[in-house]
Amino acid sequence: MGLVEYPDGRAGGAERVELSQQVASAIAAAINDSIKRTIPLNVKLWGAEHIAEYLNRTVSQTRQAILCLPDFPRPYRLPVANGTKRAHPLYKAIEVIEWVEKYRDNGELPKSRSRKPCLTSSPE
């Protein structure tokens, strides 16, 4: 493409380049804003929903049969503003992944374990 010529005879190529740079900057900013920042697994906290997704289970199955196992990682319970209730339990993602990895099938039958009581309803 050639330069844009205005009726007064001046060339508009520099304006077109500046506009292209503005468009490119806007596109780059939009892409940057849309990229989800990832939190490293060694510090990321997962709720029951994330754990269920990772284990390919329903949230209900996860709460009733997985989170209550005696060797499942202990949760974090963060305080909430009103002080009377605690937030839903959160689990360190890396600890959950390590817990799953120790159950990789090695051909042996699992040993019987006692279970801690499971919650039948969602924790408050």
Image: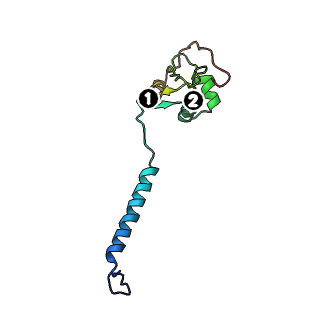
Q: Which mark is residue 94?
A: 1
What residue occupies the far top of the structure in this picture?
114
Instruction: Tell me the quadrant of the picture where the N terminus can be found.
Output: bottom left
For numbered disc 1, what is the local secondary structure? helix
Q: Is residue 53 left or right of residue 92?
A: right
Question: Residue at left 51%, top 31%?
Answer: 46
Please tell me whether mark 2 sits on a helix, a strand or a loop: helix
Badge number at residue 80: none
Residue 20 left/right relative to 120: left
Query: Pointer 1 and pointer 2: residues touching (CB < 8 Å)?
Result: no
Give the quadrant of the C terminus.
Answer: top right
First in sequence: mark 1 vs mark 2:
2
Q: Residue furthest front?
A: 8
Q: Position of residue 21 (x, y in %)?
A: 35, 65
- Counting from the top left corner in percent of width and height, residue 97 is at 46, 29
From this view, report whether residue 50 is shown above or below residue 8: above
Q: Which residue is mark 2?
A: 48
**Quarter residue 65 falls in:** top right
Residue ID at (50%, 22%): 76
Q: Residue at x 51, y 17 (%)?
A: 71
Looking at the image, residue 18 lies above or below residue 52: below
Location of residue 59 in the rendering, given as x and y in whole percent from the top left corner: 62, 31
Of 53 and 6, which appears nearest the observer?
A: 6
Of 39 and 7, which appears nearest the observer? 7
Give the residue type at disc 1: Ile
Residue 70 placement (x, y as % from top left):
54, 16
**Mark 1 vs mark 2, CA separation in Å:** 14 Å
